[in-house]
Amino acid sequence: MSIEILTIIMIGALLVTLLLGLPLAFTLGGIAMAFTIGVWGPKGLYMAATTAMSQGTNEILLAVPLFIFMGTMLEKSGMADDLYDMMYRSFGFLKGGLAIGTVGICTVFAAMAGISAVATVTMGLIALPSMLKRGYHKDLAVGCIAAGGALGILIPPSVTMILYALLARESVGKLFAGGLIPGLVLAGCFVLYIGIRCQLQPHLAPALPVEERPDWREKLRSLKAIIGPGALILLVLGSIYTGICTPTEASGIGALGSVLVVITKGNFNWKILSEASYSTCRITAMVMWIVIGSSCFASIYNAAGSQELVTNLLANLPGGRWAVFVLLQVIYFVLGMFLDPTGIVMLCTPVFVPVIIKLGFDPVWFGITFIISMEMAYITPPFGFNLFYMRSVVPKNVSMMDIYRSVLPFICIQIFCLILVAIFPQLVLWLPNLIN
């Protein structure tokens, strides 16, 4: 069977099974098994077993459950309430101040969690009712939480970056360093957009009444809420960037540090520990099944000769290597409307990264542009994960169409940030080159 026919059949089978609503991990794994037997017979299953064992026991993946545990432990601890109170006191006097503060908290959680769900759900439960109660327009209130929560996969430590590094055979530390500045730039763009829009349309997000505004003593007292998270972020990321620890070792420090922070706050108990452990196990199991299923799918496809086909198709596109780059970003955007970003990373990285390297692009820089596209996927209708996280916490008077509409300006800002990173690659490469 030619690689062209195999491609059409495999992609067609994948689309049909996804439209039927089957889980991505088992869809990819099942198709891989069926085509392995069809092309090589039962003996080909040894390749699938070897691939699953190799990916499932890779040392890099040890960081995944540990970073997830770090984020979920802090989520259960009630730390977000203290952080939101600090932001409320610090920025409430501004038009749009609560939304700006919410993006700030999401940025802090992004630097502790590695996934988007933690900040999205937590801020949806804490910040959204507060903003709506004080007259914020639902589009702005919902949109800033959904978009701010998605920062968790761009600002390190990021589970998605770890998976990309595994498949692209790149340094996790370099990717973490490369994502820091673009992540902060994107968060800054969100804040700038909220601030400018609220100045032009103050009815969208009124400032706190004068009688509700705290004095400077209360503001100073509230700043203690940032001490624990700040110390943990510096400990984890600092140990990586200074070369003291590998990302895997730093994830262990972060997991232990999150427990110590919760103990210091006086909130530690068996319920918090068990709930955080359960959430970690559930999310890690989902990630690992996607890793195994997509690895088997990619292995069978690559073994059949896909790399030569994809390279020839992309290398011969009119417009040169930048046309290829733009096409890949469009593909990621379309896939992000329908698929889990983790699955997209696992499915596309082994196929596209060798082509990118052959065309002369830096794989670390390309990886960050890929991650920005995956961040877009978290809030891109109709199936962005954060949209459904928000649906689970919004009041009944906020419809799914309201949620879809709320994220559109933030998607445009993400596209702007992607273009910015493409034009100025040193935004990504400066810090990795500095610590190399």
Image: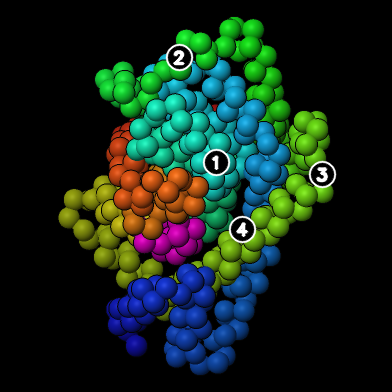
The numbered dot on residue 209 is 2
Please tell me which residue is depicted at 71% across the width and 39% down the height of the picture.
Answer: 77
- Tell me the magenta residue range: 337-354
Residues at marks 4 and 2, CA–CA distance in whole angstroms: 42 Å
Camera-nearest label, 3 or 2? 2
Which badge, 1 or 3, is on the more N-terminal residue? 1
Task: Indicate whether residue 250 is drawn in magenta.
Answer: no
Q: Amino acid at mark 3?
A: Asn
Q: Where is mark 1, residue-wise?
A: 125
Camera-nearest label, 1 or 4? 1
The numbered dot on residue 283 is 4
Rendered view: 328 above or below 307: above
Residues at marks 1 and 2, CA–CA distance in whole angstroms: 23 Å
- Please state the horizontal and vertical placement of residue 393, each as a whole percent of the image: 50, 47
Proximity of marks 4 and 3: CB atoms separated by less than 8 Å: no
The answer to whether residue 81 shows anywhere in this view is yes
Proximity of marks 1 and 2: CB atoms separated by less than 8 Å: no
- Please state the horizontal and vertical placement of residue 144, each as a whole percent of the image: 42, 35
